[in-house]
Amino acid sequence: MKDLFERIIKDKGPLGKWAKQAEGYYVFPKLEGPISNRMGFNGKKLITWSINDYLGLANHQEVIKADAEAAAEYGLAYPMGARMMSGHTTYHEQLEQECAAFVNKEAAYLVNFGYQGMVSAIDALVTKNDVIVYDVDSHACIIDGVRLHHGKRFTFMHNNVESLEKNLERATKVAETTGGGILVISEGVFGMRGEQGKLKEIVALKNKFNFRLLVDDAHGFGTLGATGAGAGEEQGVQDEIDVYFATFAKSMAGIGAFFAADKDIIQYLQYNMRSQMFAKSLPMAMVKGALKRLDMLRTMPELKEKLWENVNALQSGLKDHGFNIGKTNSCVTPVFLEGDIPEAMAMVNDLRENYGIFCSIVVYPVIPKGMILLRLIPTAAHNLDDVKETIEAFSAIRDKLENGIYKRIAAAMMQ
Ligand SMILES: Cc1ncc(COP(=O)(O)O)c(C=O)c1O
């Protein structure tokens, strides 16, 4: 018999096998200094486009003050225990009521981490007789939630309503034999490429099929819609989203997340969601900090306006310079270029070392072979100089890429 660790030590996994070449630079980089538009990296200040601090709250003085006051009053331990047992407070309840009101739902339930909460909510919402139909490009937390499902599941092609319809026909047949129901899952905004989920079209299918809709709006909450209530508000279908999810880890620059739905559904989650029943409650400092942030979302529309000024300048500037930014209709700004992985690494190195730009890089297998995706996250903390400098830098690196310079650098590095 083999020792379990024998394989683990030999085979570090699809990403882990690159650790030696990539660690500390392409993966696990250490960004230093206050979270802002320009942060320290390897001794240099770089324009930072890889932090989901959409509204620029992470380093906002009012937020830091509220967090510090809450931590000074309660410490980081309070309350102790799971919500159901000894971890419930008036502030947790208040935050839930305010989150529900903000996204126009009857009730809400807090979870400690978006990822863990989504896994657990999917687990709680379905039984083995139910059928899940979900977008093939769903976030890992949705995929892991579906993995816990003992019944049938179907994927539909990414943001493809025809494919969803076909799979709803299949799901309906299954559900009619098992006596179960159907849960459709989409994202409000797909975080890698920035396309909004086609919520309006999905919701229209409710006229033809019987299903409930769960939407992960991690990237839409606080950034889309007239009041910032997210992709459902933006597309005018918030009422038809049966279970709405948002995390505090992006536009709220905090930690924690919530589900919002009708009262009965939220009560069901309170009593059946294992990640909350068997885990410590969200600490008070986070809860009070989230109340402060939510208040700022409500009362400071200038934050979202500033965000969109930067988003529009960046996206239209990139398009004017001939860049392919895909089908984004959110703040997430992908820039698609053609090249292989070594070229992508040489290019990102050049961006950081010589052009002062720090952004995320996505390659195969997340996107098709031969493509490079540079993913930019504009925030309210950026300014138009950042945008201008970045577009100039991108034009320069694109020229180098097209002229084979990164291919030569990468080949030299490999020797
Ligand atoms: C679409 C989506 N859902 C869920 C999560 C997880 O949220 P959290 O960071 O609160 O665990 C993320 C975070 O990356 C996300 O992008």
Image (cartoon, helix red, strand yellow):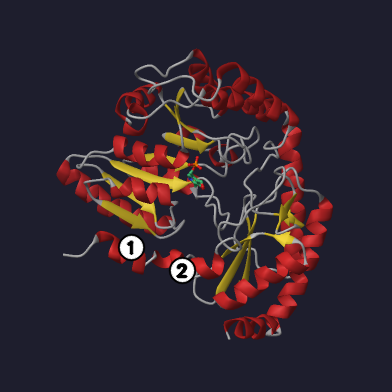
Identify the secondary structure beneath mark 1.
helix
Q: Amino acid at mark 1?
A: Ile
Identify the secondary structure beneath mark 2.
loop
Residue in the picture at 21% in, 45% down = 175
Figure quadrant of the N terminus: bottom left
Residue in the picture at 41% in, 47% down = 141
Q: Can you tell which mark lies on residue 8? A: 1
Side of 368 relative to 331 (left or right): left
Side of 172 relative to 341 (left or right): left
Q: Nearer the viewer, mark 1 or mark 2?
A: 1
Q: Which residue is label 2 attached to?
A: 365
Residue 255 location in percent, x, y? 54, 35
Q: Is residue 321 visible?
A: no
Residue 72 location in percent, x, y? 62, 20
- Label count reads 2
Q: Amino acid at mark 2?
A: Pro
